[in-house]
Image: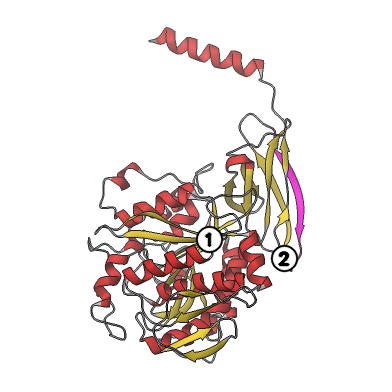
Amino acid sequence: MLCMDLNRQSQCHSSYLTEMITTDEAEAPFTLLQFIHHSYVDMTKLLKRTASVCSHISTLYTIGRSFEGKDIYVIEFSDNPGEHELLEPEFKYIANMHGNEALGRELLIYLAQYLCSEYLNGNQRIQALVNTTRIHLLPSMNPDGYEFAAEEGPGYNGWANGRVNAQSLDLNRNFPDLTSIFYRERRRRGGRVDHIPIPRSYWNGKTAPETRAVIKWMKKIPFVLSASLHGGDLVASYPFDLSRHPSENKFFSPTPDEKMFKILARTYADAHPRMSDPSEYRCGGNFGDKGGIINGAQWYSFSGGMDDFTYLHTNCFGITLEIGCEKFPVSDDLYPAWQENKEALLTYMELVHRGIKGIVRDEGGRGIQGARISVRGIRHDIFSVANGEYWRLLPSGTHFVSAQAPGHSRVLKKIFLPARMKEAGRVDFILQRLEPDPLRILTNDLLRWNKYLLL
């Protein structure tokens, strides 16, 4: 049985071990990662054990239940688990959205154990990441589909069995289609092109409980960056996934943040030893000539995807990571896959500290929630959350950033972001409250009175 001693970073052979093992106080703690597929029960036990061993930096919670009643678990890592800290960015990985794409599920299980063990071992990089970031790992968004796919076992060639949930819904086609609304609204002056509300009609359709749970989760936590792990290819795909020309499938359809999304995708691909290799031919296709990244709609177009929804409804940026040719690889392939993706998973998480962050306050020092943060030349704004906090992913260079809120002045700042920054630049705003305009008040009163007289 293949496993890895994280304290010595060497491979070893061992009997069945899935628990965290801590030596006596005179020695460094370590864990054995077992590179096998974990059933829902085994995954749950392992996540609970990991959260228990690292209880000072980790907690396990559920965001809801699947159609068949399985808890959808998330394991969180932070120096203050369970609590949002001021200006600490929130990050999430989601895997196993398609039940038969099992590699991402296992990688997040390994990643959870790795973060726990390496933090205890004194790994400075991991300690810095956990201490400055609130990390959420959701290994299995579709536990029902996984159990169905696992009945056939790893290594099978089926590309559909277990993909959907127990309602036969494809979860990555089940989110609200806000991209079509974006394409329509961007043509109108003043049209809403970010934080687009979910149409009421969406809830009248067939919405999976797994999808509802993730949407509720996104609304509760102010995520800054995310990625979903899929299988079947080797490429980092970024929004939009729906073509701006519905009749044309492979049509380049960028977001207003095209430059930033390319940086996100390339960072993962470049940290992966094979994803960006131009000489590598695999999975029946080759994205190496594109650096291992592609615009989603340019690959193939579809509506109701999670990444498009994330970008258009929240402050968060998300991409899709196709991390292996085999959707459900055999156990012998799990360790090599972990070795290929480990550095990329860590490097991508560190991107959550890219760009700027700050607090929007009024002149009395009170944080303003709902302030609009705009960047000149990028028609996509983000909004401050509780306490006036905001995070804005941006590429390096000079930017003109403004903050405004109802009843307050607009403040514009010119900023410069160097090419290499270890943490987001701090840019705070103080907005002055505007005095009421007597003429405007009188005009509004007259309009209301005239309307009354006409009734």
Q: Are marks 1 and 2 in contact (CB under 8 Å)?
A: no
- Up the image or down, 385 lies above or below 453; here it is below
Q: Is residue 421 visible?
A: yes
* Residue bounds of the magenta highlight: 409-421
Is residue 122 found left or right of 262 in the rendered image?
Answer: right
Which residue appears farthest toward the top when viewing the image? 453
* Residue at 54% across, 41% down: 190
| Element under disc 2 | loop
Q: Nearer the viewer, mark 1 or mark 2?
A: 1
Q: Which of the 4 image quarters holds residue 327?
A: bottom left
- Up the image or down, 21 lies above or below 92; here it is below
Q: Residue 398's spot in the image, x, y percent? A: 75, 58
Residue 423 colored magenta? Answer: no
Q: Residues within 10 Å of mark 2 (few under 14, many from 20)?
A: few
- Up the image or down, 317 lies above or below 440; here it is below
Q: CA distance from mark 1 to mark 2?
A: 27 Å
Residue holding disc 1: 55
Q: Is residue 301 visible?
A: no
| Element under disc 1 | loop
- Up the image or down, 285 lies above or below 217; here it is below
Give the amino acid type for the residue marked by disc 1 in the picture. Ser
Q: Residue 373's spot in the image, x, y percent? A: 63, 46
For marks 1 and 2, the one nearer the N-term is: 1
Q: Residue 230's spot in the image, x, y percent? A: 41, 73
Q: Which mark is residue 422?
A: 2
* Residue at 58% across, 41% down: 386
Give the amino acid type for the residue marked by disc 2 in the picture. Lys
